[in-house]
Structures are given as C-alpha cells and as structure tokens.
Amino acid sequence: MPSKLLQKHARIAERFQRMAAMGAIAVGPTNEQILSPTRAIINGRETVLAGTNNYMGITFEEDCIAAGKRALDEFGTGTTGSRIANGSYAPHKELEEELAGMLGRKHCIVFTTGYQANLGMIAGLAGPRDTVFLDADSHSSIYDGCTLSGAKLVRFRHNNADDLDKRLSRMDPDEEGGKLVVVEGIYSMLGDRAPLDEFVEVKKKHGFELLVDEAHSFGVLGPNGRGLADEAGLESDCDYVVGTFSKSVGAIGGFGAGDDEMFDMIRYASRPYMFTASPSPASVATSIAAVKKLRAEPQRRERLAANSARLHAGFKDLGLQLGCEEVSPVIAVTCPDEVSTIAMWNALLNAGVYVNIALPPGTPSNVCLLRCSVSAAHTNDDIDLIVELFGKVVATGVHLAKSA
Amino acid sequence: MDDNDQSIFEAITELLAPFNSDNVELKPETDIARELNIDSVAVMDFVMEVEDKFDIDIPLNVLSETHTITDLMNVVKERTKA
C-alpha cells in the first residue's frame, strides 16, 4: 500500500504505466553517452538529438571546457552556500558583468538555475499588494514565481494585447500597488514569439513594468543575440529581462537584468537568490566563456536561423501541421492524440532521432506535440534526415490516426 | 436559489459544457476540477471565460479556495457587486 501522501498521484502513475507499456520512456530516456551537441548513445545506438534546446551547439567548445576545468582547479567543485552567507566568487561577478555588457543593461543578477531566475525575479519585483499579469501560456517557472510573490495574479489570453488591455482596464483605479506584465520571447512549446510592439502600445496606455523572459530567445534572436526585444528594437520599453544558461549558453543557471537604480535590492529581498547555493564555479566559468562566444560569433545565430528555416520548410512540404507559422528554433508538429503521439515518438527514437514529446496539461489548448529544437550544430544532412524520418513516421502516422 | 443565482448558475454551466467531456451532471455542489476530472490549465481557461462573461477579474489566487460551482457563483456575485 503506497503512502497516503503519494496515493494522490495514482492517475499520474496510471498514465506513466500506459506509456511504459508502449515501450516508450518519453518522459526521460537515458543518454548513455553524449558524443557531441547533436549526437548521443541512447539504447546502445547513435541517435541524432533534435530535442535538447542546445540552440547554439555550444556544449563541447574547447575553450568553454578548458575554462570549466580551470575553475574546478582554482575554485573547487562547489560553493557550499549562498552568496549572501558565503560571499561571491570572483567568477559570479565576472559573469554578471559580461552579461550586463552583452545586454546593454546597468545591472545583472545571476541565479543558480533558469527556473530560479523567474522565481527570483518575479518574487523580487512583485509583492502581495501588487498585481502580476501573465500570459496564459507562460512557463511553469513564471506561474510558480507569481505564486511565490503573493501578488494578485491575472492571466491574459496568449499573445493577445487587446485581452491584456481589457484586463488592465477592469482594474480598480484606486489600487495602489504596482503592475508587472510578464511575457516570453519565444514560447517553448509552439515556438511563437510575443507580439512585443502590441504589448508596448498597451504599456504606453496603462503604464506598467514589463518583464520579458528570453529563455529560448537569448543568444538566438536579434542582431546582437539579446533576444526578442533586440530583434523588435524595443529594448528600452522592456524594464526587465530574464534568461537561462541551460539553452544557448550550454551550462546551468539563469539571470535577471535591468536598469533601475534599486535593481540590486532583489538580491536581498528574493528568497530564490538568498536561500540556495550559488552556481558552481565550473558552470559559471563555462557560462562566461560561452557568453563571450555568443557575442563574438554571430555566425552561430545565422547558422541556427538557416537550419531552422530548412526544418520548418521540410515539415511544411510534408504537409505537417506546425505549432507556429513563423520560423524559430522551436518547431513543433501537432499530432492527433496521446496514444498515436507516443507511438510516433517511439518510432522516431527507434529510427535514430530524439525529439521531445509534449502532452497536456504541459501544452497550450490541449494539443499533443512532437517538438523539435534546432541547433546551430546540426548539419544539412541532420536536418534532412529529421525531415525524412518525420515523413516516414509522422506524416504517415497522422494520416493513419485520422482515418482510424 | 433566487432568479439572480439561477441565471449565474445557468451561465456557469453553459460555459462549463465544453470542458465537461464526461457529461457529469452539473449541480451547485459539483466540485469543478475533481468531478469533471479537468487539469489545472483547463480550470484556468474555463475561469477566463467566466471573467469575460461577467466582465470581472477573478485573480488566480482566489481559485485555490474555489472548488464547487456554488463557490464560483459566490465569487462572481462578490465581484460583480462593485
């Protein structure tokens, strides 16, 4: 008899067992070896990785690895505490300066994970007297940051500036707290971008502070790789930017940045910054080297854009239904139902390609998705192989499921 | 239930219909998420429809204390008063 506390997860267990019975371990297969940013050994065979968010293909760069090894030698394996209690390590500050420089922001705070960056920033900015307006399709870390903040939470329809406008208009004009609006540069499931220009118009009308989570767009979008706000030319209208090191930077950690004179007080007010160990020296050191690379090598972004366009066009030619018409490195194929999606995911893995499976409630509008994330390190042959296998497995599978 | 309650109840059940795929009988004491077996995102999507129907805000914070249709009717009544 399982524990009384764990019994509430019986439905999750059923769903997991149903998946496992189909031979799929879609919720987390084991990479026995990682050979490169785009290759791993899974189930004993070499597999093309197309679901890793390793957008810049930066996880095996010699200089990044050397920087990490040097930091291990010089600073040890871990920091054994938070920066408030144990103090900062020089590389923490160096990384913050490097990021502030890249982003053109006055201040930057590094967090231990990307998840904590959203928790720490949102809970550091908003409090119980404030109101946070969040996009309906926001990442869980945004929802959790909102909950932690204790602020009043109002959800607006995904990417819908008119809906935000309507909800801001409903607010009691006498409410004295601040207003924070949170949007994402690229939404992780469908790959669509926030219509930032429209949100900025609403901002001019109502007056609020705007936070853009560039988790999937930092390093990826914009002439300087600073994200959607850079691409849209609207950085001065965005008060705060959040990002992660676990995607384009190829490490682990996250950051928040802004220009306000009191920005640094978040360090002393935000629990996800204060009450957790600071990021490990090796991870910080590889992040510094990687951010320098993102700044110095715009050709990575160009390569990523070309690869993304190639995969997007290949899927369109197959007649697949995609999550988003606009090209981004997140390219998701909409599938008919959970059972067929699991079966197709499994067939793709057996054929040698790893993609992400995304199922409700982790997806918007209850869709089932086979989600690819493109890397600058993919070759044209890799992209063509992915298209070929989706043609064999998914185009046929979708057709069969629909006619069943 | 007075006429006002009845009309709120009817509006809520109408909005709830698309989320009620198992065709559970909807009564004032029905626990929306548990009895209809709908996930947290669907609950939030449904509440958004209720907000628009009555032109009110129902902050997400309120939802943790809102379980049954009666609970939700009380929230609607409270927030349409002003």
Image (cartoon, coloured by chain):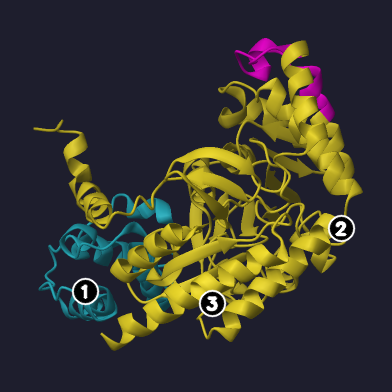
Chain letter behind tag 1: B
Chain letter behind tag 2: A
The colour with which the image depicts chain A is yellow
Q: Looking at the image, is A237 positioned above or below residue A30? A: below
Query: Which element is circle 1 on?
Result: loop
Q: Residue at x 46, y 76 (%)?
A: A392
In the depicted view, which residue is nearer to us: B10 or A359?
A359
Alpha carbons under labels 2 and 1: distance apart: 51 Å
In the depicted view, which residue is nearer to us: B39 or B30?
B39
- Do pointers 2 and 3 mark residues of a single chain? yes
Tell me the number on the disc at residue B20: 1
* Quadrant in the rendering for residue A385: bottom right
What's the amino acid at mark 2?
Gln
Q: Nearer the viewer, mark 3 or mark 1?
A: 3
Part of the protein shown in magenta: A75-94
Percent of width and height locating residue A237: 80, 60
Q: Residue at x 65, y 61 (%)?
A: A374
Disc 2 vs disc 1: Cβ atoms closer than 8 Å?
no
